[in-house]
Amino acid sequence: MSVNNEFKPKIVAFCCNWCSYAGADLAGSSRLSYPADVKIIRVPCSCRVNPMFILRAFEKGADGVIICGCHPGDCHYSTGNYYARRRMTMLFSMLDYIGVEKGRTRVEWVSAAEGVKFSETMNDFVAKIRDLGENVRLGDLRCKN
Amino acid sequence: MQRIGVFVCHCGSNIAATVDVKKVVEVIAAEPGVVHAEDYQYMCSEAGQEKIAIAVKEKKLTGIVVCSCSPRMHEATFRKAAERAGINPYMVEIANIREHVSWIHKDITEATEKAVILARAAVAKVNLNTPLTPGESRVTKRALVIGGGIAGIQTALDIADAGYEVDIVEKTPSIGGRMSQIDKTFPTLDCSACILTPKMVEAAAHEKITIYTYSEVEKVSGFVGDFTVDIRKKARYVDADKCTGCGACQEKCPSKKTPSEFNRALNTRTAIYTPFAQAIPNVPVIDTEACIKFKTGKCGLCQKICAAGAVDYTQKDEIVTEKYGAIVVATGFDTISLDKYDEYAYNQSPDVITSLELERVMNAAGPTHGHLERLSDGKAPKEIVFIQCVGSRCSDDRGKPYCSKICCMYTAKHAMLIRDKYPDVNVTVFYIDVRTPGKNFDEFYRRAVEQYGVNYVKGQVGKVIPQPNGKLLVQGSDLLDNKQILKEADMVVLATAIEPNKDVRKIATMLTASIDTNNFLTEAHAKLRPVESPTAGIFLSGVVQGPKDIPETVSQAGAAAVKVVGLLAKDKLLTNPCTAKADELLCNGCSSCANVCPYGAISYEDTLVNDHGIRETRRIAIVNSALCQGCGACTVACPSGAMDLQGFSNRQILSEVDAICR
Amino acid sequence: MQELITRAKELLANGTVARVLGWKIGDMPYNPEPAFFETVESLDKFVYNGFCGANLSKYMIEASKLEGKTLVCLKPCDSYSFNQLLTEHRVDRDKAYIIGVGCKGKLDIERIKKTGIKGVIAIGGAEMTDACDTLAIDTIYGEKSCSYNDGMLERCHVCKGKEHKIYDELIGESRDTCDKERFAEVERIEAMSPAEKFEFFKAELSKCIRCNACRNVCPACSCRKCVFDSTKFDSAQKANVDSFEEKMFHIIRAFHVAGRCTDCGECSRVCPQGIPLHLFNRKFIKDINEIYGEYVAGAEAGSRAPLVSFTTEDAEPSIVNERGSK
């Protein structure tokens, strides 16, 4: 048991099956480590990520949510990530508007060949979330018990 | 509630060394719905799969979670195992505890905790899985090969020989590709044209092969087994049916100043031209940018001279639409631009050339008719310096991070050929490493050194300085003797890095095929599926997948052909059952889903519904499951939640979120 | 109003329309209610005045299923909603006979009360024919007055314009009542620190009683069944779902109508707790305009909403980090 009292953030990463999940696999097979705080959910495409999923994660206590997809122009489904890009831009802006710190949400385009980028992105994201500390706001917005 | 069995794989020590698999079994066994949990050395082995079958039978399992390697690796394996055991294959979920856990985390406690959480998420998902049945789609028994170089030709020949129709689309006026520009091939020193030309002729003559030269793929739609492709046949302005290939037009053409693409701009060609003598088809094209008739309206000499009446200035581009079951990308390579490499004086001196240019210089049909001479003054060189790794294995953004693989061998070939034909010429090769893995390759290199006296210097060249006397001062270092070298050379040859053809990104986008940061197409699996793209129905042949020499290209071309034939041999394909589906009681008929569907798979029908006793006709979204590829864009566009994705439903994903954030 | 009633009676009598969708007198002088009138006689109860803020376009969803045409009275801003519903195939243009009714800004009893006026018995000056700029209010405490402008709904101070975007005929004059900066309040919030923003919305949203009035009145919230009422986003842990819904209701609702909301302001008008719900929708409108270019939902039937559209050059989501507050 690690006697480590440092803040362990809960981080959900939605990864598209074709690029980013494969990128995460490559990070794995290349032994490029990143913190265990990151848990990946496989979705077919970044456009499958419903804002409901992200809000739900925050409400359940996630400290950060990251969505990874194919680079714009390289979507396995041609255009899925373009829709994801608009949706996430809008959602993140709304979260910022209601006072959820900007650093808690992120979209990153990671190709199947970018194991290094996947690992670097996750290391960086986790570091930022650790700096921000625990997310208390979204779970508390309606302040009703 | 499902009856779920969880199977935790050790993967030898790959997982078990970092994840306490026994602990995972112990914790997960207490999850709701889990009625069985066990661990095993190798779940993917026959014995491992047997364990699943036994548990299914004894514990009456309805769902399976395998905690193992990536689903991209063995999801299909375990789905098949489930099916054999009598469970719907889509009742299987994989928790990726190898690539996403054991291989990246070191702390056993931490890794075990994460493995448990991922297993829980998979259990939560399986709890909501429903049996799915794949549909069927037809297979068009015809293949398209994009690119008519040796890779494309070989793939097409192999597919055609197996009895299937193949079309080759080649951008330039002739098939043949890079290999047709090469003079001799290593390690046998065969004449490249002598071994390539028969293949070109065979392809052209093959009754199953149709060749579209001077043509480009313009649009691709559809999916594996059923692609629809628009091919633009650019206007040649020469009627291929009438042209006899006599060449009179090219002799008479007064516009002679266009740099020859085939000879790497070392000499010029006419406006109406065939790229090289053995071109297939032997039908010229008119370059409208160079043609006087097209530029000024005057001239028309070629039309006058053509006895066959084949020249037709009114010809227009033509779009051919064809259906294909499979598409092979064989778009090949080019050498990188040397604009960022000022130190080698490539743009300053005509006597600094690339290796591909040297191929043309050495070739009898090249600009110097095969005589080794300086392009500046035509003099015979006495001192030649070869520089290796120009732009390859490069850590900055001027070049490429990878090894171009072919340079060591062709440089040995060039050096050997020069020393053989011109024994009075001194040849020096500056290299970082000499890489010669391959059958008879190292023997070949050693011959260059030992038999032909080629001077190999381990070290890099810092600068090439053109001298007033016309010579080139080469400043380099000898790392073995630890000294600086200054050498006056008559010619410098740069082993320039190769990169995928510039058009490949555009083509990859059309095909929705993955591409890496260096513009090589990504293979479905780096080791086990090297000739397939992750996009079903798309195959890779030749350098488009990664640097390779001719024998490797030909082997890979054959491998791609076999994969294509394996696909075309099927009459029906099973389609992915993870498609979108609209709940007719919730659908508003608002068209948001159809607006975002990349496949036009959603239409609307006025449907009589019975909504809890209210019978009315409503505009309802209908998903064509044969067209739907399961991206899920529609599910988020749908405000009412009527549209959901089977296999990745809203509830399934939310349950994973909940399990992770618990 | 009389011209409108006369014309409605005429169209009902000659069979052009089977019913009239308008407003009828309510139990208080300031709360006329949306109503269907099926006979000429019933039209005696028809009313159209400054308190007829209700947007009738949403009622056309059900009216489109009925036999015959429905005469519907749409104010200029309501016509945007109708167009948006038309774009989404929720209403049938052929089933609607649209009379574009004049509007000089609609009144908000809550605003009038905020000026200190209580115990309202009757209000004069709210009629559409009245050119008067002052409301004469009879209260149990005696005669009071309030300027028409001060009594107007928030949305009318940021009026989209006096033009009807769709109609069969027009009756009455309209006035552009815009006298405030539409995005000023959104900008004020954007400039706050995350903690201030959070406190602001927490204070507002904690008032919510989940009565669903905002959802029920919203012409963009036209789903046959709301996701919050279906099991589609449910998960195994049912007990927790309710709290999720409660906490996220307004954000998700705003997201669902993003790019489709015409900023008709009905949500804020009907909220019994006075939560400025339009501030969510207007934030999305502002973002869409700034990031993807000006878009007015419902200005044109058939236009493609920004969230079901894209360009390959769209901004990256990180743009959110580069703009607004820290």
Image: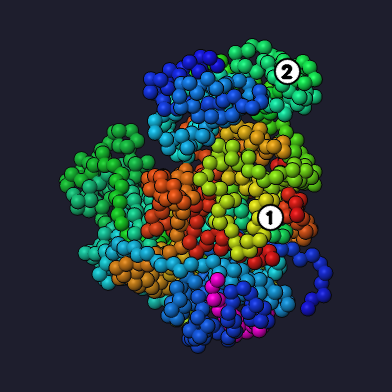
Disc 2: host chain: C
Number of numbered callouts drawn: 2
Residue at horizontal 40 percent and vertical 45 percent from the top: B616
Q: Which amino acid does label 1 sit on?
A: Ser
Q: Where is residue B34 in the image (x, y as percent from the top left)?
A: 59, 77
The answer to whether residue C69 of the structure is visible from this angle is yes
Q: Where is residue C275 in the image (x, y as percent from the top left)?
A: 71, 38
Q: Residue B168 or A145: which is nearer the viewer?
A: A145
Q: Residue A105 or B657: which is nearer the viewer?
A: B657
Residue at horizontal 45 percent and vertical 59 percent from the top: B579
In the rendered view, tell whether residue B573 sits above or below residue B212. below
Select label 2 or label 1 by which is in front.
2
Disc 1 target residue = C243
Q: What residue type is labelled 2?
A: Ile
Disc 2 target residue = C137
The span picked out in magenta is B1-22
How far apart in space, not on screen, are marks 2 and 1 (Cα)?
A: 44 Å
In the rendered view, tell whether residue B266 sits above or below residue B191. above
Q: What element carries label 1?
A: helix
Q: Residue furthest front?
A: C41
Disc 1: host chain: C
